[in-house]
Amino acid sequence: MEPKLNPITVEIIGNALASIADEILVGLIKSAYSTNIKERQDCSSVVLDSHGQVVVISDMSLPMHLGSFLFTGKALLERFGKDDIHQGDVFIVNDPYSGGPSHLADVTFMAPVCNEGNLIGFVGNTGHWPDVGGKAPGQAALGDATEIYQEGLRIPPVRLVREGEVQQDILNMVLLNVRDSENRNGDIRAHIGSVKLGAQRLSELVDQYGSKKMTFALSELINASERQARHGILALAEGEYRASDALDDDVETDEPIPINVKLVVKHKPTPSITVDYSGTGPQAKFGVNIPLHGTMTVVLWVMRSILDPDMQPNAGLERVIKVVAPVGSLVNCQSPAPVGARYEVASQLPDTLFAALSGAITAGIEAGGHGTHGMGFSAQPPNSFIYYETVGGGGGARPNKDGVNGVHITSNLPVEAMELEFPMIADRLEYVMDSGGPGQFRGGVGIRKDWRMLIPSYVGTHSNRHKIPGPGLKCGKAGTLTRITKDPDTNRSTPIPREITFLPVIPGDVVSISAGGGGGYGDPNKRDPEKVLLDVMNGLVSEEAALRDYGVVLDMTLNVVDVEATNNLRKSKN
Amino acid sequence: MSSLRVGVDVGGTFTDHILLDEKSGVILSYKTPSTPYDPSKSVMNGLRYFKDKGRGNGLNGLWMVAHGTTVNTNAILERSGAKVGLITTTGFRDVLEIGRQTRPHFYKWDVDRPDPLIPRYLRLEVTERINSVGEIITPLLEDEVWKCVDIFKREEVQSVAVCLINSYTNPTHENRIKSILQDGLPDVYLAISSELSPEFREFERSSTTAVVGYIGPVFDKYVNELQSDLQKEIDPIPALYIMQSSGGMASAKVEIDKPHLTIESGPAAGVLATADLGGRLGLLNMISFDMGGTTAKASLISDGKPATTNMLELGKEATGYYGVRITGLPVRAPSIDLVECSAGGGSIARVDAAGLLKVGPQSAGAFPGPAAYNMGGTEPTVTDANVVLGRISPDFFLGGELDLDPELSRHAIEEKICSKLGISLEAAAQGILDIVNANMVRILRVVSVSRGYDPGDFTLVAHGGAGPLHAGDLAQELGLTQVIIPPNPGLFSAMGLILSNIQTNSTVTRFMKATQNNLGFIREALSREEDRCRKTLNKEGISITDQIIEKHLDMRYVKQNFELEVPIKGSIDTANHLEEIVATFHSIHERNYGHSDSNAVVEIVNVKARGFGIIPKPRSADLPFGTGDLTGALVGKRSVFFKQSNGWLECPHYDRVRLFQGDEIQGPAMICEFDSSVVVLPGQKATVGSLGELLIRAGKEINNE
């Protein structure tokens, strides 16, 4: 018989689970060793139920990491069975084709919680390691790995800690297969320590409420998300909404890979949305592919944003949103396709979904963004180091305001933190003028970052929107393209490809990225001329662009808009 | 002769004054409406009250005005600070705006990072560069600094912030820029990063410097005006002290150039008062819990000391995790570690789309206020739920000054909650309390459990207008064994102001391994920081016998980036002592993060000292013992709903000021006073202590349903 629980207790338990997830994440960040986790905070945490379904993620979790948790619990149950999963165990997994995260670099840890021998659920975390082995340091093989085997060590769900005892032989095997193993060992301790704390907290909560009530509350929290999602769908008009975009190329050739999406919104029999990627191009030879659960993750991320940002993106939301993706396509690649740079496609999927949804709603969406830009630097022994960072570009403009300037889903690394640990000097970190797509609301501007090498090193890149910029919406114009350059602003200046594994650089060389801007929203001729003036004063838009893109005539000796000239110019443009 | 002190706490609604006569120990209080358009007005209003009414000897002999202010916080929240210019290293003028480049909310795409306090056109660059070990790799081009001077003159900035890359390792260039600015812009306020926050991470340092540039002129003006008012009206002029976020006082003269240290000025005082009360009662481990109209704040006191943090984030939805996923404006300043949530008497309850009951973060505020106030509010609030369940006595509410209408509370809850959830009035009202309590339990857990402490080892000290109403339930939820309600809980923060010591902090970043060969360096660095503290205390006029110095090292495993503070007892003279310190670090690490590694190398990041100047504490006489007969304090019987018994219980209703030491009250019962009511739950027992505090001990175990 089901215990009776009122919605208030369910809410209270939900809050308690959220605070457990927060604690796990903070513990991981504060005690980790790699800059990727401790400074860039590229990590997340979760609570699952006994069926392995996601119930709660920490609000501080990265949306992309939901993919690290969607199938992990289920994979553990399939492999080990409920009876062979015990309190005190910690499992590790990173293989996307074995129920793990969506690329090898996100290493996931899961600790079960039991009560009187019965499995209640799991707590887990995932962190983007700077290196997981493979043919080049720091995930740098993104540009030339053709199979996932080359991208790093593949770990299926494995029991790393057995009832409190670290399985040293397994740990040794993992550490032998990754570079910079001493620091990875520190990260592993932080991963295990924080899920251990989380498991202890969840156990206390189970003790407080009893396992029956807890199990019921977990399923009710999932049901609540389902109700929230269905309610949100009713606010969208029924119908089909389409949009397309494309990834720059498949790295092998110059051919762009099309991304096509069709959203089918239905109110009956129950509110639901089908997101159909039929017509999307085939999986590529190199690692720009995304596995199905990665695609699902982005869809759930966007759907939560649209339907009700305060809901938990858990299994309840999954019930309402159906994802159709052709097998063997860019968005549902098959083993052993490489997936290292899967965030490139992932970064464009929200753009496409928003573009489709712009037919249905005018709030909570954005024009196309800048994509993603990962920069890796490394050196071989004796001065070996591995360093990875993402660089922010412009967010797409919104229906009521400009796009976010210089933004990325993950954090940057402070320049001073970088210079303390790595043999490089940053020469600049600044906004790129005229990068935001013109519109009534301007796309966000991109960031330029320059690194000067102090020792012979290698550069690796993975970066998109080098050929196809973040599109505008409703007559807004596209943002700029991204460029990566060696020795910019000199006569030695040479372009660096968007996907490269080992580009040797020597002391004095400067590697520079100018990340693209976001797309604009609405007709640029309708932009408030005073906003254009402010942008020019702030050096985000040039005087020439004000005239060319916005039809605004300025007098910059007095910092004023020439209203009459502007009106005339704008009339003549129409 | 000089023996009077006044504590003044300016809050959002009321300004509270406490006057202490050090000789007699007599304490007088005064509550007056705050004057947000000119906060110094309500401060002076209260002082005038004491003076004109001839109370406190006409303020003859007033030597100290201890002040908790929100002037700095408000300048930032309302964006009413100074016009600031920034000078930074070429290539880095956008650091202040880019921050950590992430979105404040991953699912709300229309939420932006806070606008920078300095717009881009006022962020100027100069050619110079220092590397991470402090070497000058590009000399400063002074001509460019003079060009900045010209631009700032033309733009008529009121202050200039200077933050160069790696200046924390070598302040030479910032010093040079400062002296050029002093020459070129003599009337402009200067904020120099290497003076304010010489620690790594350029965004956090820039942000701190920008905040100082932004609030500095406002704070200067406020303090100067207040001082001139004091001079006009009180002879001889008392010294003005400002409460800092750290929980210590600094005289306005000595540390006026560090306004960022006072951002949590008011809330810190309540925590201080808690620590002092605990000290007098022999309690070392407490959770200070302050609940007002819109927010609740929790803070941990362990071993008699309030927990502290080195950074605040302004404009961040408080999670209690400053510095993790930075989305606000970071300010590096030692602060009492307060965790806030939007939960107060005015928090509004509603049923959301999924049919779940939610409370807050919206608040009915002071106007229109809860429905019961009959000032036009129609949304059900936490206060309304308390009224409906009989937990607030209309006769006692603010001494009966405000008429509460329970009928309006009932109506609001029935219309907005009961009808949607199909539940009874009691269930809905109790549900509102359960949810707001759960939110508060969460912050109480953040400060305790999340930091590795078992709340069961702590006493909950509940204050603020609404704190005592909820304390009993919170204690049960958390498994706390005892709760203390101080006398005059609504004036507790003002009390904290006259209890606070003078405090100064000094920190230097000094990376070194915690190994024997660094013993000399560690010792030297610690004593240098100690000297700096003593110098400030000397300036404050604190005699050496009244000075106390505490020393700490911020430590971590090599390769980590977050540090843990390890206290240092005495001076580090031997390798053994250093080993003990490292062992302490391992155990603190284990407690916080669930793991430690005694083989790993530990490094020191910051060397810190805190200096205290001891100020005599008021020590009122103990409350006399009563006979144990409560009839003199009994004002009647009330019917109150308790979830513990799932029904209405008749309970006695006592007037707190008529209780005596040793009196015992068995729950269920209500104890009321001017500014709050205490609910003693069935099974709990309240005992009146020697200082007039109520000690409530838990009885029954939790009942979940």
Image (cartoon, rainbow, N blue to C red):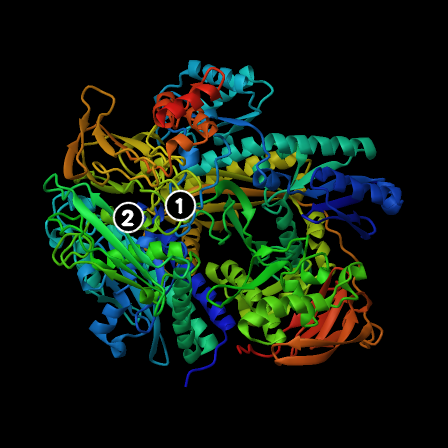
Q: From this viewpoint, which residue is outermost toward the right?
A: B54
Q: Amino acid at mark 1?
A: Arg
As helix, strand or loop, the secondary structure at mark 2 comes to helix
The local crowd at label 1, few if under 14, some if 14 to 19, many if 20 or more residues have their Cα within 10 Å, is many
Closer to the camera in the image, B604 or B359? B359
Mark identifier at residue B103: 1
Left or right: residue A173 versus residue A448 is: left
Q: Are marks 2 and 1 on the same chain?
A: no
Tag of residue A444 = none
Write down the chain letter for disc 1: B
Q: Is residue B469 above or below residue B100?
A: below
Where does label 2 land, which residue? A352
Residue at horizontal 58%, vertical 59%?
B343
Q: Amino acid at mark 2?
A: Thr
**Residue A86 in view here:** yes
Q: Nearer the viewer, residue A358 or B361?
A: A358
Which quadrant holds residue B639?
bottom right
